[in-house]
Image (cartoon, rainbow, N blue to C red):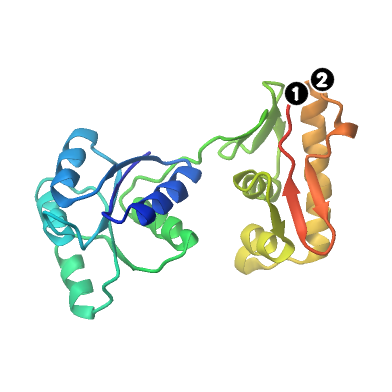
């Protein structure tokens, strides 16, 4: 699924692009209003993340021109928090409005919500970390092209989060919040979930000729949390 990111702040544009690409979106970019219209016409994205304060042509004008020709979902992104600006952006056809600063989680949640309302529900991207591959839509994990191993929804969510942050340690609390959300979870439940996930990855490793005993994959960091050791079949 393709997203057009329009922002003249190169640092923020990089952050938004990285956040979206990490979630499996294909990102194209523009850095001023006129370029945004040109890229939109050529690329025909599924979603536009549009800054309001742009050179050459402001985001409100870009939003208005696009809305005259298309119902492409538009997520307005700006430092402006004045109610009049918010109302103006929505009246011109914006589908949602995020004020800076924002968190990557908020951006993804709002982008997905806008796409759902527009009937363009994104398909989860296949994750790849080394030779480990996760298909979230099928909830299957495989290693180096081996046979797929089925995962439960919680196992899939846990592995997805670990793969998104491969090579980094995630705190126990952060994992619990990501996997269980408002339904809640606890450290004992997480330990059991990690144990089951390790077993599933070990099955995939064995099918691929990898010695699971020498490749723990999911590392426990005492007093902190867990991290994914990127596996290879070498």
Query: According to the image, label 2 marks what residue?
Result: 209
Q: Secondary structure at mark 2?
A: loop
Locate residue 174, reporting x and y percent.
66, 63
From mark 2 to mark 1, how far is it between C-alphas? 8 Å
Q: Residue at x 14, y 63 (%)?
A: 92
Question: Please, is residue 200 above or below residue 56 in the view?
Answer: above
Q: Is residue 47 left or right of residue 176?
A: left
Query: According to the image, label 1 marks what residue?
Result: 233
Q: Is residue 138 left or right of residue 16?
A: right
Locate residue 212, reporting x and y percent.
86, 31
Q: Are marks 2 and 1 in contact (CB under 8 Å)?
A: yes
Q: Residue at x 78, y 45 (%)?
A: 218
Q: Residue furthest bottom?
A: 83
Q: Residue furthest right?
A: 213
Q: Residues within 10 Å of mark 2 (few under 14, many from 20)?
A: few
Q: Residue at x 35, y 45 (%)?
A: 120
Q: Residues within 10 Å of mark 1 (few under 14, many from 20)?
A: some
Q: Residue at x 75, y 23 (%)?
A: 233
Which quadrant of the rendered structure holds the C terminus? Answer: top right
Locate residue 133, reporting x and y percent.
64, 32
């Amino acid at each position: 699924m393709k997203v057009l990111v329009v922002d003249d702040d190169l640092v923020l544009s990089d952050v938004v692009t990285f956040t979206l690409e990490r979630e499996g979106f294909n990102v194209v970019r523009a850095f001023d209003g006129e370029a945004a219209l040109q890229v939109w016409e050529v690329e025909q994205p599924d979603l536009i993340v549009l800054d309001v304060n742009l050179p050459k042509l402001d985001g409100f004008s870009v939003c208005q021109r696009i809305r005259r020709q298309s119902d492409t979902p538009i997520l307005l992104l700006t430092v402006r928090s004045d109610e009049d600006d918010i109302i103006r952006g929505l009246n011109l056809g914006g589908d949602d409005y995020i004020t800076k600063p924002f968190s990557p989680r908020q951006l993804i949640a709002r982008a997905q919500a806008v796409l759902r309302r527009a009937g363009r529900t994104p398909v989860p991207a296949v994750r790849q970390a080394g030779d480990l591959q996760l298909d979230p839509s099928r909830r299957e994990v495989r290693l180096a092209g081996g046979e797929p191993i089925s995962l439960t929804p919680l196992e899939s969510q846990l592995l997805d989060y670990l793969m998104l942050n491969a090579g980094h340690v995630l705190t126990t609390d952060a994992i619990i919040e990501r996997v269980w959300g408002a339904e809640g979870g606890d450290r004992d439940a997480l330990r059991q979930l990690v144990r089951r996930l390790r077993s599933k990855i070990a099955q995939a490793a064995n099918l691929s000729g990898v010695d699971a005993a020498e490749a723990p994959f999911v590392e426990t960091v005492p007093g902190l949390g867990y991290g994914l050791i990127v596996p290879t079949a070498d």
